[in-house]
Amino acid sequence: LELSERLVTFATLFYIGFFWIDYFLLSREFLTATVHLVFFLAVMKILTAKTNRDYLYTAVIAFLELLAAAILSINFNFFVLLALFLLSAMGALTSGEIRGRVQRTPATPRSGLKRFYPRLAVLSVSITAGIMVLTAGLFFVLPRTADAALSRLPVRRAYLPGFSDQVTLGEIGEIKTTSRVIMHVRIFRRELVAGLKWRGGALAEFDGKRWLNPNPQADSIPVENGHVELSPPGALRTGQHINYHVDLDAVDTDALFFAGAPERLDLRQLRVLRTDTGSYRLSQLPAPGFRYDAYSRLEEPPESAPPTDAATVMGLAARERYLQLPSLDPRIRELARTFAAHASTYLERARAVERHLRTEYGYTLELPQHEVSDPLAYFLFTRKKGYCEYFASAMTVMLRTLHIPARLATGFQSGIYNPLTELWVVRASDAHSWVEAWIPGYGWTTFDPTPPDPSPPGFALLARLGLYLDAGETFWREWVVSYDVNRQG
């Protein structure tokens, strides 16, 4: 395929104009837009190459693309592509040298070429392997500071609705269809994992379509020598202790994720923020590879835990906040009273609403085909199926109609255990919403009205392959991306 000079000139001028559109509107990053420009130049050079000098320019452009990939990517697939690039580069440069010599010398017999090509392949593989071994040795010997390198990387963060101060009903379900890894967690007592939830935030007010915290308040907690005590006065409760290590991927939230009630946190930060909804945040978005260690006390079911004096009274302002209701379809109040008709205590009423939602409604990730004016009433009386966000919203609102303070909690389910790395892999598809209700004598108590997902599990072979790929990513992250002077010592 040969392109005319006029067409090449027109395409080049067009892309120069498109570059600024890419920079300001599409990529919105100069480096990413420049990478796209370099790729365009590579394609044009390949289509118009005629001389050895043209092929040399193509090789230089390919090397620039490799450098850009090294800057933009910290994933394990970069290592695989790097090996393929080196192998291809050796073959391309060697064949280019052969082409040049052939043009300057008499033709070589075909029998000689048949013996030469296998030797060329062996030579390319050998040189590539030697380069990889040499650079790997230098990598583990030369001093480095991983934090400094990571802090300068351009970041493509995972979008996580549900951890800001405003969430439209249905947003959390949008990420449940993606499998991007959000975090890896090492739990040091695996027998405590069953039913764990990684809580990241909570929302207090509902306007019929959105959950929000209109006037968020937060207290700054200083971090001393890498440690911070999180338990506010009177927060201690019965339950088993659990300690775990969290390794966050690049996410677009400053929320910290905990199991149970966090009591202590070890991390490299100057301060941590405690919000008025019982959540914890950083003062800024975390860098890629951010990690922390946490110590929590797991919540015991109130049916088996003794009541505590510290959790008997809620302030008037807080009570009004967690009983706030928008204009509701009157059928919702009536349905809540029907569900709790035979319950006498606050705890029994909450359990009754939870049980009815779990057993009388279905689970689906499919969104309604059309926009509805009252999504909660549509879920409860028309569609009667949805995902966690609808179940948790319905229960929170119905508890408030029964004069039980409640709020919507957001986070993730426990994830999938990878025996190859002994880590729990938490993905965007594990996003979850549940309910926290204030029960006199017990304080904030967790309820989960969402029924199990009836969808059949995926292919076992693909799931196993995913665990192997995740193990490779983990090794790459631990021993390459995060490899620093501490590990060298």
Image: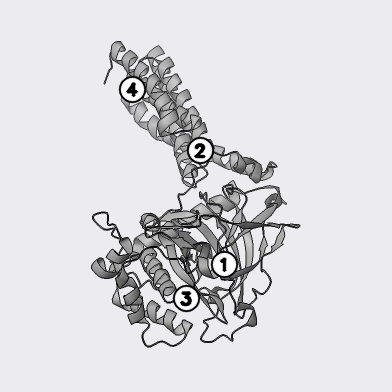
Looking at the image, is 52 positioned above or below residue 95? Answer: above
Whether residue 42 is visible here, answered yes or no, is no
Choose the circle earlier in sequence order: 2 or 4. 2
For the point 61% across and 42% down, which residue is it?
151
**Dot 3, crowdedness within 10 Å: few (<14), some or many (≥20)?**
many
User: Given the image, on which type of amino acid does mark 2 rest?
Assistant: Leu
Quote the CA–CA distance across marks 1 and 2: 48 Å
Quote the CA–CA distance across marks 1 and 4: 93 Å
Which mark is nearer the camera, 1 or 3? 1
Indicate the quadrant where residue 58 lies.
top left
Choose the circle earlier in sequence order: 1 or 2. 2
**In the displayed structure, does residue 406 sit left or right of residue 12?**
right
Looking at the image, is 356 positioned above or below residue 94? Answer: below
Indicate the quadrant where residue 374 lies.
bottom left
Instruction: Check contact, mark 2 vs mark 4: CB within 8 A.
Output: no
Choose the circle earlier in sequence order: 1 or 3. 1
Mark on residue 72?
2
Which mark is nearer the camera, 3 or 2? 3
